[in-house]
Amino acid sequence: MVSNNMVICPYCQTAIRVGEENILCSDCKMPHHRECWIENGKCTTYGCKGQMKPNLRIAAHRRQNLPPIEITFAETEEKSFKKLFFRYQWVFILGILFLLGLGYYLNHVYLP
């Protein structure tokens, strides 16, 4: 439940603040405080059989404490036709030779 840009726990009816441990129901996506989910034992939505999973949107600040990953251009690989051609050029060459040989064979077999 969202009210005025605040996420409200449906069990205790209080706001779920950024950084608080919270659970997101796997079926109905209803957020709960972790303690409220454990106390209730399940999702508060009537008839919902969802399992608990961490709500990563509200707990996103925890990921920001990690050092940034630096990626250099040497680690990335460009998927272009030119790169693919040079990587698999032997496949192209064998394919062309096979087709030429097949054409030569069929030309001599079916022509008198």
Image: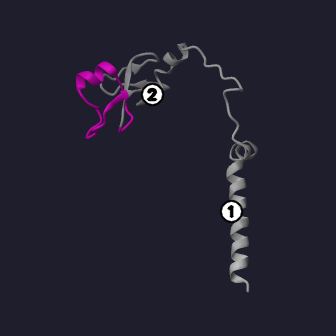
Q: Residue beneath label 1, please?
A: 98
Up-down: is 54 above or below 87?
above
Which image quadrant is residue 26 in?
A: top left
Residue 38 falls inside the magenta stretch? yes
Residue at image coords 61%, 19%: 69
User: Could you tell me the amino acid type at mark 2?
Assistant: Ser
The residue sitting at 41% across, 16% down in the picture is 20
Residues tagged 2 and 1 counted as in contact (Cβ below 8 A): no
Which residue type does callout 1 highlight? Phe
Mark 1 Cα-neighbour bin, 10 Å: few <14, some 14–19, many ≥20? few
Which region shows up in magenta?
27-53
Circle 2: element type: strand
In the image, 105 versus 19, the foreground residue is: 105
Of labels 2 and 1, the one closer to you: 1
Q: Closest to the observer: 2 or 33? A: 33
The answer to which quarter of the image holds residue 49 is top left
Q: Quadrant of residue 45?
A: top left
Total marks in image: 2
Residue beneath the point at 46% across and 20% down: 59
**What is the x, y in percent for residue 2?**
44, 29
Image quarter where the C terminus lies is bottom right
Disc 1 on helix, strand or loop?
A: helix
Tell me residue 21's x, y (percent). Answer: 38, 18
Q: Which residue is under mark 2?
A: 3
User: N-terminal of the two: label 2 or label 1?
Assistant: 2
